[in-house]
Amino acid sequence: MTDGHRYTVDLIAGDGIGAEVVPAATRVVDALAQRHDFQVVWRERDWGSAYFFEHGRMMPVDGTEQLADADAILLGAVGHPDLPDHETLWGLLIPIRREFLQYVNLRPVRVLPGVVSPLREVSDLDIVVVRENVEGEYSAIGGRAYRGSAEEFAVQEAVFTRTGISRVARYAAQLAASRGGSLTSATKSNGIIHSMPFWDEVVSSVVAEFEGVRLRSVLIDALAAALVLRPADFDVIVASNLFGDVLSDLTAALAGSIGIAPSANINPPRDYPSMFEPIHGSAPDIAGKGIANPVGQLWSASLMLDHLSEGAAAADLMSAVEDVMAAGTRTADLGGSARTEEFTDAVLRSISTQS
């Protein structure tokens, strides 16, 4: 945070519908900034697949250096049908996460007004997945050999460190302590013989420091089934990079739509900027049509404001989103007819009438 509640935020609209939902978020944040007496200086970065087609890379060589003095990063979407996903993700999103040690990927999930869960009689789902975000199964260690031959093989190494597990477990335990004390750890220690027993041991030792936090370790396959059968049994879930990625998409779907789910890539010590993004992807099939749902981006912006210590503005943003949805204004993916701009205008009107 800069002096006088003035924040510098880097904007990376990226690809597809990012160009539509990011401007919606900046309009809303600017309105809240005026209402709550702070200022946001936006620095737009034209990085993404269009940048790749011109320069052969997703962002400049010194891209992370350009971002390093920001207070936060607001990202729209990454992905293009003419580029492999590993090219787009490892060229932009993952380097930012790792360079800035954004080792917590926070993904809150709850059923918003007007959204119907595919599960019977579920209306009060409220889960937070805390995903380890910089190591685990998503390492760059490994390779392929004998390409194109019958002998071709691939080796992919997972990396689990005591430091990495401890810090994400501590974050999750602190969060669980603030929400009622229930913490579930995703594991597969019956089948993955080295890394998962290590994960279990370190998570257990860290959580033992938190009086009142109740830890249970659940095998990932059983956990996925239990989330569908008994979602109300869960509150905070801590998981490795791969397991957390899968579980957060599953819980978002249980809440009715993966298209409205937010995420925060957090560097808890605040040594580096944190990055906030919806998880819906670039949605090239609807890009440019003006019908994209901005809720995931708006919710991500709310997480950003909360991280910047503008908690009242963050709460007002989500209150306005929920009021608008409760009143029946929804985009086509949620059964409504509102366009992106119409939904955003309704949120702005709701903010203007808040006491």
Image (cartoon, rainbow, N blue to C red):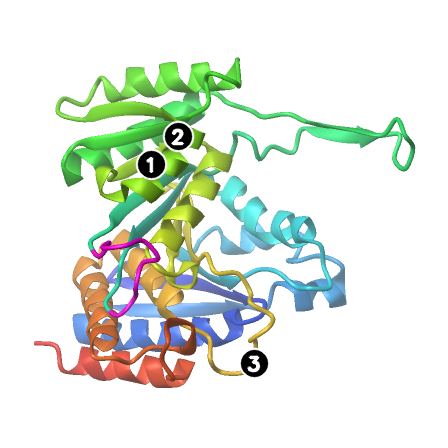
Q: Secondary structure at mark 2?
A: helix
Amino acid, disc 3: Gly
Q: At x 52% / y 13%, what residue is drawn? A: 194
Residue drawn at 50 percent across, 55 percent down: 67
**Tag 2 or tag 3, which sits nearer the N-term?**
2
Residue highlighted by disc 2: 222
**10 Å neighbourhood of mark 2: few (<14), some, or many (≥20)?**
few
Sooner in the amino-acid sequence: mark 3 or mark 1 = 1
Q: Cα distance, mark 3 to mark 1?
A: 39 Å
- The kind of secondary structure element at disc 3 is loop
Is 122 in the magenta?
A: yes
Residue 215 placed where, x, y %?
25, 24
- Label 3: how many residues lie within 10 Å, few (<14), some (14-19) or many (20+)? few
The numbered mark at residue 288 is 3
Residue, x 23% and y 17% (percent of image)?
208
**Residue lying farthest front?**
120
Residue 26 or residue 64, whichever sits in front: 26
User: Which residue lies under the disc numbered 1?
Assistant: 226
Question: In the displayed image of the protein, which residue is found farthest to the right?
Answer: 149
Residue positioned most to the left: 355
- Please give the range of residues in magenta: 114-123
| In the image: residue 143, left or right of residue 244 | right
